[in-house]
Image (spheres, rainbow, N blue to C red):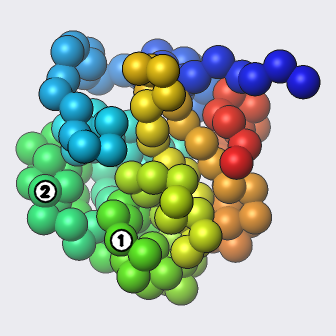
Amino acid sequence: MTPKSPLSLRAISRALGVPVLVALAAMPLSADGVSVEEAAKYLLILAASAGSEGRVACKELDMVFQLKKQEISVDAKANVAWAFTPAQTKFYLGEKKLVVCSSRKLFADGGTIAFERVNGRLTVFYNPANLEKSGIHLPESFLRAAVKA
């Protein structure tokens, strides 16, 4: 089995049927490889696909700032949530949200989607079992393009 190539913003946009709103030009990287600025832009696309257009649940202050900067509402009732810690991940899983994480390490705590850098390129990973637990359905085209973890 050959590994899938990493997803670009354009590929995610095509897979989800959502136009790219912002170009991702040379952004600084966080310690984990994906900046909150970049992750916020991907969250916008995922939220639209998950029926939570323009809304994301989030408790992490850096991400809250970036979401508001992208004109995304921080809403506890949103179907999609950003989690940075195991506690946040478990909480949002209990709320039956699509939990997007800063790392695949949080899949063990209930994370569904993770953005990570692999060989310098942004890669989108997903956990099928946790996706099913969330009750949120993503387009098949997105799931085929993402890397199953």
Which callout, 1 or 2, points to the residue nearer the camera? 1
Q: Quadrant of the N terminus?
A: top right
Q: Is residue 95 left or right of residue 24?
A: right
Asked where in the image residue 76 lies, by quadrant, the reply is bottom left
Residue to which mark 2 is pinned: 62
Asked where in the image residue 28 lies, by quadrant, the reply is top left
Q: Is residue 63 visible?
A: yes
Q: Residue at x 23, y 72 (%)?
A: 59
- Marks 1 and 2, the one that precedes in the sequence: 2
Q: Residue 84: give x, y in percent of width and height.
A: 33, 64
Name the amino acid type tagged 1: Thr
Residue to which mark 1 is pinned: 85
Does the residue at mark 1 contact the one at mark 2 (Cβ under 8 Å)? no
Q: Nearest the camera: 62 or 64?
A: 62
C-alpha gap between disc 1 and disc 2: 13 Å
Q: Is residue 48 visible?
A: no
Q: Residue at x 67, y 61 (%)?
A: 131
Q: Residue 19: give x, y in percent of width and height.
A: 41, 21
Q: Residue at x 64, y 18 (%)?
A: 5
Q: Nearest the camera: 35 or 55?
A: 35
Asked where in the image residue 144 lies, by quadrant, the reply is top right
**Label 2 residue SS:** helix
Q: Residue at x 63, y 48 (%)?
A: 126
Name the amino acid type tagged 2: Asp
Q: Residue 70: give x, y in percent of width and height.
A: 16, 40
For label 1, count other residues whose C-alpha is less than 10 Å away and answer few (under 14), some (14-19) or many (20+).
some
Q: Nearest the camera: 149 or 77?
A: 149
- On screen, 147 above or below 32? above
Q: Is residue 65 left or right of residue 26?
A: left
- On screen, 115 above or below 135? above
